[in-house]
Amino acid sequence: MGIETMSIQHGSIGKHHKFSNLNVNKYLVWSDKFGQRLIESNFKSNYIPVGCPAYDSYFNIDRQSDYEKKTDLLFLPNPGVSETPESEVEYALKMCCDYATRFNKFRLFIKAHPGGDQKILEDYVDKLDTKNIVVLDKQSKIEYHKYLFVFTMNSTVGLDCAVHKVPI
């Protein structure tokens, strides 16, 4: 058709055969490192390292806080519709809620993946007899620096946590 196409890096790129068949003219990646991974995966087009604008604002956040006084934990599950099945999301949800229930000095906040089902999380938490577990709206902005610890599953959230120096 003669139409120029491009793809934008959404998460971490590993060496994988799926990149060898991409029908795009250019792939915008976060860094040369990820571009090299495309090449190692037989990617046939050009890549352009452009950085990751989503992370630029992170460096302007004031993180001066009293770490020992933090009691809020955050669980960010996968949507359960990709490589991580819903059954693993449910298992991790149960594990995190059990932890917060046993150690009630902590408050657990849970935020569904934007592509995930928030109702599954809400239904599970509604059955629990606890006030220290809160399901956040899945479209809400995450302020990582407010949390003592973040639980996640196979997600680029790990990169966000690293930038914010929040343990995962």
Image (cartoon, rainbow, N blue to C red):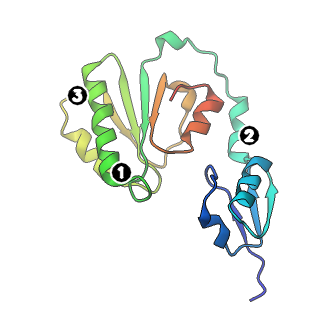
Of 74 and 87, nearer the camera is 87
Earlier residue among tags 2 and 3: 2
Other-residue count near label 1 (Cα within 10 Å), few / some / many at <14 / 14–19 / ≥20:
some
Q: In the picture, which quadrant includes the N terminus?
A: bottom right
Earlier residue among tags 1 and 3: 1
25 sits left or right of 111 in the view? right
Q: Determine which residue is flagged by label 3.
A: 130
In 3D space, how far apart are the residues under numbered discs 1 and 2 (Cα atoms)? 28 Å
Give residue 59's position: percent from left, percent from top: 72, 31
Q: Is residue 72 above or below residue 26?
A: above
Task: For mark 2, give the secondary structure.
Answer: helix
Q: Quadrant of residue 10?
A: bottom right
Numbered badge on residue 56: 2
Earlier residue among tags 1 and 2: 2
Task: Please count the marks in the image.
Answer: 3
140 sits left or right of 116 in the view? right
In 3D space, how far apart are the residues under numbered discs 1 and 3 (Cα atoms)? 19 Å
Q: Residue furthest bottom?
A: 1
Residue at position x 66%, y 68% in the image: 20
